[in-house]
Image: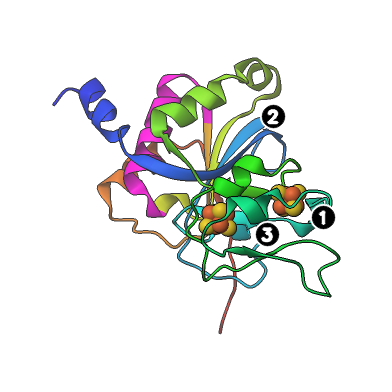
Amino acid sequence: MAYGEAVENLSREMVLVSHIQRGAVQDGPGWRTTVYLKGCPLRCPWCYNAESLHFQQELRYVPQFCIGAAACGRCLEACRSGGIVLPGPDTDGRPVVRRQLCRVCGECTQVCPSGALSLVGRAMTAADIVQEAEKDRDFYSTSGGGLTLSGGEPLVRPTLAAAVMTLARQKGLHTAIETCGWFDLDAPENRTALRHCDLLIFDLKHLDS
Ligand code: SF4
Ligand code: SF4
């Protein structure tokens, strides 16, 4: 199989991305585009990307953004699963999400005017991710920046990680991976990913004796 064809095959896998941060300055050198993949095998109590822990799409609710059920209440009408209920006395007039009944259909997010409700997890291919990162190429060239793959844990998606790193390299982007270290070093795709990675940022989570 030709090299280009192999990369093409690698790049077809879809992955859920929780969010993409442009102009990141703490995930490697220069101005960077950091792509947060969903899904991590660890459950660190101090995780600052809790929306990236699970591998599936999720409903995010930020009550502080809600303008109140009395002023709006559209989500209560939109949800047909009982996933959103009227506010109780201690919710300051804001609806409550009942996770056990939510089907993650996204209907409520379509009508929420304030962004309090949103779906986390956008399906993207490696090609989509690199294309997104390429939009800031001018900033990379003046700052020494590039693309950082983060999470979640990007290397538990070896095929996707290999495809992103390979494609980004082909496009001349500086590449970095942020890892918690929980991944299979013997997986050939991970070796491909690391071979095309300019900087590995290893987040050592904890030590024991
Ligand atoms: S995502 Fe769907 S099921 Fe869940 S709360 Fe919103 S409307 Fe209800
Ligand atoms: S739709 Fe959004 S802003 Fe309106 S009540 Fe529901 S959560 Fe609040």
The reply to whether callout 2 and callout 3 are in contact (CB within 8 Å) is no
Residue 171 visible from this viewpoint: yes
Mark sitting earlier along the chain (2/3): 2
Front position in the image: 205 or 111 = 111
Q: Residue at x 30, y 33 (%)?
A: 12
- Location of the C terminus by quadrant is bottom right
Height in image: 72 above or below 3? below
Mark 2, Cα crowd under 10 Å, few <14 / some 14-19 / many 20+, is many
Q: Colour scheme used in the picture?
A: rainbow
Q: Position of residue 22 (x, y in %)?
A: 67, 32
Q: CA distance from mark 1 to mark 3?
A: 27 Å
Residue type (three-letter) at the residue carrying disc 3: Tyr
Residue pushed farthest top?
A: 138
Q: Nearer the viewer, mark 1 or mark 3?
A: 1
Does the magenta stretch mainly form a helix, a strand or a loop? helix
Which residue position is annotated with label 1? 68
Mark sitting earlier along the chain (1/2): 2
Q: Residue at x 78, y 73 (%)?
A: 88
Q: Position of residue 122 (x, y in %)?
A: 49, 41
Mark sitting earlier along the chain (1/3): 3
Which residue position is annotated with label 2? 31
Front position in the image: 18 or 144 = 18
- Magenta range: 156-174
Residue type (three-letter) at the residue carrying disc 2: Trp
Residue pushed farthest left?
A: 1
Instruction: Using the rendered view, name the quadrant where residue 48 is placed.
Output: bottom right
Q: Which mark is residue 48?
A: 3
Q: Position of residue 197 (x, y in %)?
A: 46, 37
Q: In the rendered structure, does residue 21 fall within the stretch colored magenta?
A: no
Q: Is residue 76 left or right of residue 38?
A: right
